[in-house]
Image (cartoon, rainbow, N blue to C red):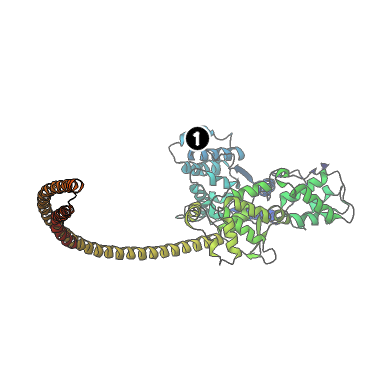
Amino acid sequence: MITSENGIYEYYVGGSVPPEYQTYVEREADRKLYEGLKSGEFCYVLNSRQMGKSSLRVRTMQKLQTDGIICGFVDLTRTGSQHLTPDQWYSGFILSCVGSLNLVSKINVRSWLREYEDFSPIQRLCEFIEKVVLVEIPNNIFIFVDEIDSVLSLKFSVDDFFEFIRNCHNERANKIAYRRITFALLGVATPSDLIQDKNRTPFNIGRAIELNGFQPNEVEPLVKGISEKIVNPRLALSEILKWTGGQPFLTQKICQIIVNSDSYCPKGEERKWIENLVRSRIIKNWESQDEPVHLRAIRDRILNNDQQVISLLSMYQKIRSNLRKKIKAKNNSEEINLILSGLIIKRQNRLQVYNRIYSFVFDKKWVDREIAELQPCSVELGEWLDSNKQDETKLLRGTNLQKVLKWTDNKIWSTHGYQFLIASLKLEVQLLQSNLQEQKKLELEQIKNLETIKINKEDLQKDLLIQQECNAKLNSNLLETETKYNQKFKEFNLKRNNAFKNIGFESSLILILFLLKFVLVNLFHADRVSNFLSFLIFILAMSIATIASGPFEEIRIPLKEEEKK
């Protein structure tokens, strides 16, 4: 740290640069804000974080107070934003005004609030400004309201608050006292963010103060500190600005790193020495070296925007990949949020990455990794884009398509993402229509088959009836045949029994004749008689054979005829 008669000479990294620090860099915005407020204009400085808004407010208040103007300051982050009621929030705003405007000795705030407890919160604030502030302070009054973006996280609407500020401006035409009060708003927001009710008139008063980064002709206050380590500090500062793009926080931080460094920059090697320092102390392992927090704040502002995170990353990737042919600004919500994050900047209505450090830290690998983690179909989308949007095999179908559709609820996707989704839906519809047509064809074929089966069934039923009739006739014929057969069989049995009786008699007679022949031949040697007896035996045997075969011949013929039927 360097001290002099004029104050402290030290680089201030993070927060508002105190008035006594000589390293404050005065910019064009300092002059515009001071002149605007002095002329009675309502002003607002809306920009990304760590661009020096609070330091600008401190310096401007200091100048105005030197001119004898009463300045009040309200930091809306101190009033709170979580679990507050409207009464508590507005009461906190009034308390901050009382303290910063030195009204503590002139008003008992708690008693005054109890006196007006039947009023609505915004009515109490109106009464406070008109009957307390404008009455107790006869001079011109400037009220700086910082961190206005904190109201966006409140559980209730504060549209009435910004309507009140606009009414204070409009009341100047009706009440002279209101010409003595002027508001200056600072924060990370846009005028359209301030009044969110679309049925109300947007916040359209006041003068916008553009707060740019450090310009080469403005950084002379930073030279003295690094001159102890660098022979040519102005050349080194120009190299620093090439890396930071004039971003105030990063520029002050690199200067402070140089002052704290144990090494010295060799003469003539300023460019290489600054580059090595930036790469080793800022870019390399940036998440662990990012103290005070800066790069992580940019990352979180983008990734914590649940609705637009994919579209923000995709647009940033598009801007980053067109470094030479810069993209023309369209002032859509994605561009505005990227600008408010500090990652990109709009110059001459063209969008570009704010500086080289951001380009190296938030490079293509980082973007691809974050998209892959957040987006369920990043690979398919990338391959589809690589095919010039022609490869339908990369499109989503079925359950994957349903998952992505559900994922896109309450999210704003990139243009390519929506094109990919629409193409997937079209393909899905085409496939469904094709499947429906095929299903209709199958149904028609099934109907035809059913009709054919019905006809065949009717024919089959007819055939069954015919077959049943035939079976009935056959059964009748079989019954008749069986009856005839049984009758024949009975007759056969009767004839057989009679035949067997005759056969038994004749067989006995043959036996007797054989015995007689045996006696005659062996005892009397009567050959002729023996031959006669042999003849009788033959006749009797033939008679037996005829008797035995008679019944079988009679039944065999009718059985064969029945079999033929």
Front in this rendered view, residue 258 or 34: 258
- Where residue 538 appears, as percent x and y from the top left, is 17, 55
Residue placed furthest toward the right: 267
Q: How many marks?
A: 1
Front in this rendered view, residue 414 or 481: 481
Front in this rendered view, residue 323 or 210: 323
Horizontally, residue 225 falls left or right of residue 370, namely right
Residue placed furthest toward the front: 524
Can see residue 251?
yes
Front in this rendered view, residue 238 or 73: 238
Horizontally, residue 548 falls left or right of residue 402, namely left
Residue drawn at x 15%, y 58% as measured from the top left: 553
Residue located beneath label 1 in the image: 112
Quadrant holding the C terminus:
bottom left
- Where residue 437 appears, as percent x and y from the top left, is 38, 65
The quarter holding residue 261 reads: top right
- Where residue 31 appears, as percent x and y from the top left, is 69, 55
Can see residue 245?
no
- Where residue 373 appears, as percent x and y from the top left, is 60, 50
Quick check: 492 above or below 448? above
Quadrant holding the N terminus:
top right
- Amino acid type assigned to the residue bearing label 1 in the image: Trp
Residue drawn at x 76%, y 44% as measured from the top left: 21
Where disc 1 sits, the SS reads: helix
Badge 1: how crowded within 10 Å, few (<14), some, or many (20+)? few
